[in-house]
Image (tube, rainbow, N blue to C red):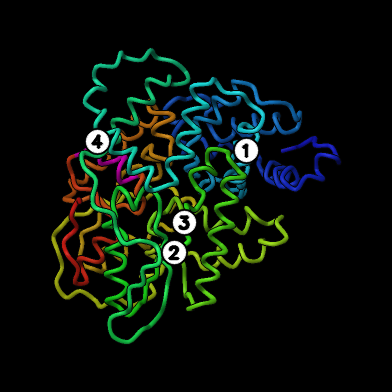
Amino acid sequence: MKTEFSLAQLADPDIAEADRILRACVHCGFCTATCPTYVLLGDELDSPRGRIYLIKEMLEKDKPPTPEVVKHIDRCLSCLACMTTCPSGVNYMHLVDQARVRIERDFSRPLPERLLRAVLAFVLPRPKLFRASMILARLGRPFAALLPAPKAAATPSLLRRIKAMLALAPNRLPAPGPSGGSVFPAVGERRGRVALLQGCAQQVLAPRINQAAVNLLTRHGIEVVLVKDEQCCGALTHHLGRDGDAKARARANIGAWLAEADRGGLDAILVTTSGCGTVIKDYGFMLREDNDFAAPAARISALARDITEFVDGIDLPAQAQRSDLVIAYHSACSLQHGQKITQLPKELLSKNGFVVKDVPESHLCCGSAGTYNILQPDIAGRLRDRKVANIATVKPDMIAAGNIGCMVQIAGGTSVPVVHTIELLDWATGGPRPGLN
């Protein structure tokens, strides 16, 4: 793709990066076939190729984004399926991230939307506040039916988004898990030492996931530490275009993790929420222009591992007894497209005795995508229903996924239990049967 940035514009490292990305695009359109919003809406501007044109024009002209541009960028899930199918290696992720930062900086959204986004950015990364908000949402959910039906619109109304938030609130919350600073010693001879990301929403909604990871790892000789001063990884605010907040959280985590590595040694930083893992693995790029943090960020990105990547390397004992339990494996977008981890979780489940079934249209997003199911509830609901219908065709006993957002989203449309991959692996190697509390 031909670009027309001035030399002055190209002096900006972000614009120079955007120029490299745009020039790699050859207009082939392969991306349209795997883009969820294009599949649903059939609008070229709701495809990666269409959004690339919009972003190119916005950046080249260096003018505030128009409402039309914002509408179509906001509809992007950042599922990154387009990057998997792109034959030219276009890094759409870094391009759309830059567009979101520009929109957040230069576009004035309606006041109700600004307030909602500010609340999400403030509450979700703070587990104590998030827990309190979930309790309030649960109390308010019975009144959601009394709210007037929102009118259909290109951009969902505040009322529609509030109803979506209330619908996502769980019926009850589990007790909090272990706090930061906790250390879980290896059982028997210590074979390694890792930090386990505590997460934000996950530690409130499903602390059982990290508990299963701790159980499995310590049982197989791995010491696990929950780093005391760890913060939200920054993914939530990063995808809202709040670049300063996301980078500040990244820097804080880098400092905390490196201090822990220097104190006791770390073989890896393990992540059980793939959306977080994709961003942590990108810290090196995010902070590439930061003289103080570029090298430390790259070191942390190199240490980051999805939990399945690490478990695959510790040689779980082969299971003599096989189960007839049918598992539908939902491949989270951030795992299959963001981190290119596709077969490994399924192979681990299969090796450990489960009957694993691929889900039709597994490349399409479930509609969770961080805060997307709140900010774009109608599209998210259609994608969830499509995903649940595809899952139903394999008649599973359980659904496995590697991302808490996907788990909550899919569970809202099915009665089939939805569990984390690590919970099944823990169960298969001596842990308890996965529960839902």
Identify the residue at image location x=71%, y=38%: 1
Return the x and y of residue 229 as percentages of the image width and height: 48, 61
Q: Are marks 2 and 3 in contact (CB under 8 Å)?
A: no
Q: Earlier in the sequence, mark 2 or mark 1?
A: 1
Give how far apart the Cα atoms at labels 3 and 1 are: 21 Å
For badge 1, the amino acid type reads: Val
The numbered dot on residue 228 is 2
At numbered mark 1, what does the secondary structure look like: helix, strand or loop? Answer: helix
**Between 100 and 347, the one nearer to me in the picture:** 100
Horizontal side, residue 433 vs residue 146: left or right: left
Residue 259 has which mark?
A: none
User: Does label 3 or label 1 sit earlier along the sequence?
Assistant: 1
Kindly report which numbered mark, 1 or 4, lies closer to the viewer in this rendering. Answer: 1
Kindly identify the residue that appears in the image at 47 percent across and 59 percent down: 230
Give amino acid for label 3: Gly
Query: What kind of residue is marked 4?
Result: Gly
N-terminal-most mark, 2 or 4: 2
Residue 36 pos. (x, y %): 44, 35
Q: Range of the magenta residues?
A: 406-414
Looking at the rendered structure, the secondary structure element under dot 2 is loop
Q: Which residue is mark 1?
A: 101
